[in-house]
Image (cartoon, rainbow, N blue to C red):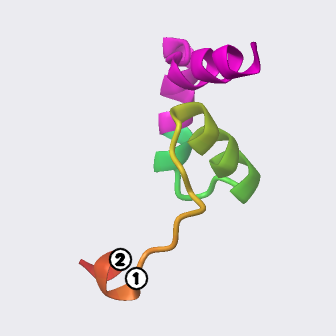
């Protein structure tokens, strides 16, 4: 049951209005880190992956 719940919640798309709000938060230059974390979660963006500095500069 827990596996099914995890699968369903991870493969469901957010409602269009929440996704639009999350995108606007991510595009905003003055959004707080908490809002950015929420928006990343809504959009399913994994933010805890490190990226080499050389790749980030490209």
Q: Does residue 49 sit above or below 45 in this rendering?
A: below
41 versus 32 height, above or below: above
Q: Position of residue 5 (x, y in %)?
A: 70, 16
- Magenta region, residue range: 1-23
Name the quadrant containing residue 14: top right
Circle 2 residues within 10 Å: few <14, some 14–19, many ≥20: few
Which label is found at residue 56? Answer: 2
Let me know if residue 55 is in the magenta part.
no
In this figure, which residue is indicated by the disc labeled 1?
Answer: 52
Tell which residue pokes out farthest to the left in this image.
58
Q: Residue at x 68, y 22 (%)?
A: 3
Q: Nearer the viewer, residue 9 or 24?
A: 9
**What residue is at 51 percent from the left and 73 percent from the top?**
50
Above or below, 9 relative to 43: above
Residue at (31% x, 87% y) in the render:
54
Numbered disc 2: secondary structure: helix
In the image, taking residue 53 as reference, residue 12 lies left or right, namely right
Considering the whole magenta stretch, tell me its main secondary structure.
helix
> x, y percentage for residue 8?
59, 15
Task: Identify which residue, 53 or 23, lies in the foreground.
Answer: 53
Closer to the eye: label 2 or 1: 1
> x, y (%) of residue 28?
52, 50
**Image quadrant for the C terminus?**
bottom left
Do tag 2 and tag 1 residues touch (Cβ < 8 Å)?
A: yes
């Amino acid at each position: 049951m827990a596996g099914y719940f995890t699968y369903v919640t991870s493969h469901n798309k957010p409602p269009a209005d929440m996704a639009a709000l999350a995108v606007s938060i991510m595009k905003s230059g003055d959004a707080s880190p908490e809002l950015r974390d929420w928006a990343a979660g809504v959009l399913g963006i994994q933010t805890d992956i490190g990226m080499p500095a050389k790749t980030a500069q490209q």
